[in-house]
Amino acid sequence: MTSSMNFFARTAFAVAATVASGLAGAQQSELNLYSARHYQTDEALYDNFTKATGIKINRVDADDAGILARLRSEGAASPADVILLVDAARLVRADAEGLFQPVKSKLLEQRIPASLRDKDDGDGSDWFGFSTRARVIVINKANVKREDADTYEELADPKNKGKVCTRSGSHPYNLSLFGSIYEHLGAEKTEAWLKGVVANMARDPKGGDTDQIKAVASGECGIALSNSYYVARLMRSTNPADRETMEKVSVIFPNQQSWGTHVNIAGGAVAKNAKNREAAVKFLEYLASDAAQGYFANGNNEYPAVSTVKVANPALDTLGPFKSELVPVALVGANSMRVQQLLDKAGYK
């Protein structure tokens, strides 16, 4: 009787273990992705991952703020496995709120430069940058000389009064740039610089980066800031109006004689409550592969984070090489939160 009971107990345990194993396998064959990347070219990126691994991607798309709000509201019940955001400041803020978990991966450590990922405190990095974009200056060829706008500092120079256009100062792309300026100049000089930029504005901040480029081309502004991939997108456009816009402007990589041009990142992390951690890490490692890095560069006109990847993008080739700053993006992201307090003082809308 005892022997029979032991047999049935062992059998029941074996069946339960088999079922659990099967469920775990099924679970790991899916990946829940919360993405702030909403570029059509990323579809091929995700499809190729599924083809290579058999792991199905369930995707939720929203902007950075929407994704972080959703993670906060869902808490421990969140189904998210991987988070993709498009700004260093947002990555740093989300990490500070405890929304990510560390990843220890030799592949990611080898492929992603230390300056483009979170600091490793021994248990791995909480997030990784997978592509970069330069914060360039765009000028009207007819109205502004290159030498009058080839540094970020000159955006605040009185010689450019009434010429500057930007999007909102509190937009993450600008906050990250201002976080870089803060690192180079310090709090007091950064505040003075912000006030100088405001004093030089041709109009109140509005619109996105493409709007700034078009405003420069139309003559509404003489100088504007833009992420490089917006410039490259217009350069590659088949729309005659876009081509006409780019014929009227010049693109400058600022501060080539000093600290270099500011670069921001699009990056990813494993969610704090990820149920499919193994698949999540595999996906991040895939994003560091040559194939995925090529999609970032050739599909969305971004620069690959992996320096050995060759870019086959005519627009980026035309823009040419440039010297980028060496300030770690994690530090820039942390500074950007401090800069937010300076915007009100400077009257930067």
Image (cartoon, helix red, strand yellow):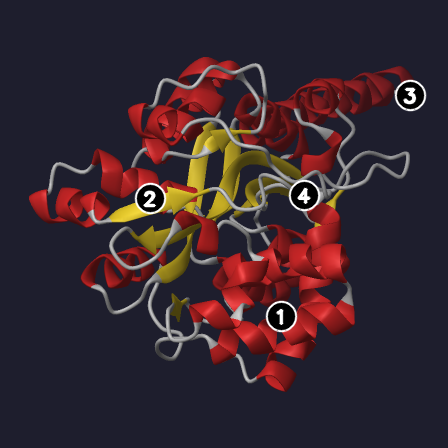
Rounded to the nearest whole Å, what is the CA distance between mark 2 and mark 4? 22 Å
Give me the disc on residue 2: 3
As displayed, is residue 1 above or below residue 255? Answer: above
How far is the residue under mark 2 from the one under mark 1?
25 Å
Residue 334: where, in percent of width, then height? 74, 58
Q: Residue at x 24, y 54 (%)?
A: 142
Residue 268 visible somewhere in the drawing = yes
**Residue occupied by mark 1:** 193
Secondary structure under the numbered disc 4 in the rendered image:
loop
Mark 1 or mark 3, earlier in chain: 3
SS for callout 1? helix
The residue positioned 43% from the left and 40% from the top of the image is 58
Residue 285 image offset from top left, x and y in percent: 61, 23
Q: At numbered mark 3, what does the secondary structure look like: helix, strand or loop?
A: helix
Residue 39 in view in this figure: no
**Disc count in the image?**
4
Q: Is residue 97 above or below residue 8?
A: below
Q: Nearer the viewer, residue 73 or 296?
A: 296
